[in-house]
Image: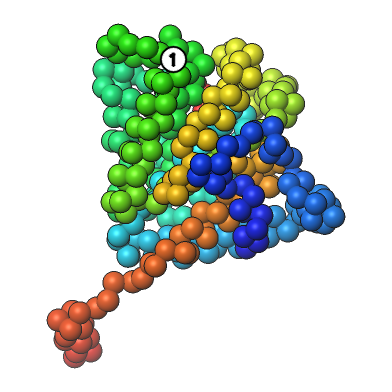
Amino acid sequence: MIKQKYIDLLRVEPGKKIHLKDYETGWAQTKDFEEIGKDKLKERANEILQQNLADLTQVQQLLYADDRYSLLIVFQAMDAAGKDGTIKHVMSGVNPQGCQVFSFKKPTAEDLDHNFLWRYMKSLPERGRIGIFNRSYYEDVLVVKVHPELLQNLPDGKRGKSFWEDRYEDINSFERHLERNGTVILKFFLNVSKKTQKERFLERLERPEKNWKFSGSDLAERDHWGDYMDAYEDAINATSTKWAPWYIIPADNKWATRALVADIITSTLRDLDLKFPEVTEAQLKTLTEARKILEAE
Ligand code: ATP
Ligand code: MG
């Protein structure tokens, strides 16, 4: 397990105003880490990842049996920050029957004809299960804020600061509603640097087996890097709550991202009061009788 004090550095305290530029995208998040050294830390991160994947298998089974909570995990990031790879690795240990991943792309005409939360509501995890949102309703205060022309047809009104503040409020209320109904929410912003994004884009262009991952629009969005960082900063500041905290995860090194995300998910589930349902007297009687019948065969 990663020490709580390091995880605390990544969790955005409700009400606190953070600046993304104060967060490292690399591995040296603290002085302690710098002293340990990159190679040692990487080795340790991989061990932590493996241990957490094993633990996650157990705790997911308990989540399912307990059947009171569900877990919603939101991933947001710039392109090539490693959302897909992180989801793939972290979920490699879980039972597919208890887990679903939804990747939200550009909204359809039907989506746009509804309120902005509609399409996400339909994909929420059932009790006992883990739901992963690869992009989410946060796109509606990120890409849509950077490109206001993407906004659906709405009644006339101001589209300035207060419009976005209303959306943050809607999101907070929505998440509060979910939490009150047993959904535990974790939100990860994979914080990649512009430099690393460039390196990963170049790799996608150079390696034929990675070409398919590159899209022309990736460069266009990169051009809006500053606007995106502002939009992320505003959204994170407005929506990191006690019931749905944001974690800002360094994403320039995949080993660090994966170990941190796996650790936060596993320890969040472990901290819930999950238990196997108690067997009632009547059930116990049925079990005893069933055993007698089988043994008498
Ligand atoms: P990858 O590139 O790794 O396959 P991706 O999540 O970037 O994964 P793309 O198909 O490249 O998938 O991009 C999806 C696009 O849809 C993103 O540019 C994203 O901003 C956009 N999008 C998602 N939700 C919305 C939304 N609500 N409104 C407008 N655009 C959205
Ligand atoms: Mg993309």
The x, y position of residue 218, in whole percent, is: 59, 18
Which image quadrant is residue 163 in?
top left
The x, y position of residue 95, in whole percent, is: 42, 55
Q: Quadrant of the C terminus?
A: bottom left
How crowded is the residue under tag 1: few (<14 C-alpha within 10 Å), some, or many (20+)? few
User: Is 96 rendered above or below residue 24?
Assistant: below
Q: Nearer the viewer, residue 287 or 78?
A: 78
Residue 105 showing in the rendered view? no
User: Is 90 rendered above or below residue 55?
Assistant: above
The x, y position of residue 185, in whole percent, is: 42, 47
What residue is drawn where x is 68% and y is 47%? 256
What residue is drawn where x is 70% and y is 25%? 194
Q: How does the figure colour the protein chain or chains?
A: rainbow
Q: Nearer the viewer, residue 238 or 201?
A: 238
Residue 249 showing in the rendered view? yes
Which image quadrant is residue 209 in?
top right
Numbered disc 1: secondary structure: loop
